Amino acid sequence: MESAPPQNITELLLAWSEGDQDALQRLTPLVFGELHRLAHHYMAGERTGHTLQSTALVNEAYLRLVQTNRVRWQSRAHFFAVSAQLMRRILVDFARSRQYAKRGGKSPVLSLDAVPIPVENCSELVALDDALRSLAAIDPRKSQMVELRFFGGLSVEETAEVLKVSVETVLRDWRLAKVWLRRELLRG
C-alpha cells in the first residue's frame, strides 16, 4: 500500500480533531502502516521471546489514540510524534511492571548518534526514560526533541515543525541533549 500524502493525513487529523468520526475511519488505514513500522522499530530491540508483539503494541497505542479527545492535531508529524511517545510509554510501563529493570546496577550506555536506534533491552529503555524525565525537569523542549527524534524517528525538519522552532535550534538542542543524556546514563 502506498503511503498517503502528508497533506491528506493532516486534513483528516484536523477533521477528526473537530469531531468528525468518519475522518477517523478514513484515517486509520492511512496511518496503520506507519504505526506498525514504529512498533516494529521498538520491538526489534527487545529480547527474543518478548511477550508483547508489535501488532499488540500498535493496537494498544491505537486504542489510546482514538480515546483521546483533547489533542488538537497540528500535522502528520505531530500525530506520529504522539504515537511514538505512546508506544514508548507502553513499553516502559510494561518493562517496569515486569520488573526487568534491576536496582543498584550501573546504567547501560546507549548510543544516540543515529536515529532511530532500537534499545537493546528493557533496562536500557527504563534508564533512558529516567534520564529523559530528568532532562524534562530542566529543559522540557530538549526532552521532547529527543523523544521526537529518537523514539518517533522524525527528521530534523519534522521535529522543527512540531516544536515550532528553527532547524538550527533542533540541531543545536540535539547536540546538547546527546551530551547531557550520555553523561546521565554513564553516571547511572
Image: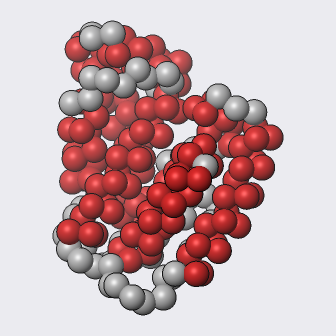
Q: Residue 88 versus residue 24: which sits nearer the camera?
A: 88
Residue at image position (31%, 23%) is 70
| Residue 90 position by quadrant | bottom left
| Residue 183 position by quadrant | bottom right
- Residue that sits furthest to the bottom in the current view: 105
Q: Is residue 132 above or below residue 140?
A: below
Q: Is residue 69 above or below residue 142?
A: above
* Horizontal relation, residue 30 to residue 61: left or right: right
Asked whether residue 22 appears in the rendered view, the answer is yes
Give percent across and percent down for residue 79. 43, 32
Q: Residue 92 versus residue 61: which sits nearer the camera?
A: 92
| Residue 163 position by quadrant | top right
* Horizontal relation, residue 92 to residue 111: left or right: left
Q: Is residue 31 above or below residue 51?
A: above
Q: Count the numbered circles shown.
A: 0
Residue at image position (23%, 14%) is 21
Give percent across and percent down for residue 74. 49, 22
In the picture, the quarter occupied by the N terminus is: top left
Asked whether residue 150 appears in the rendered view, the answer is no
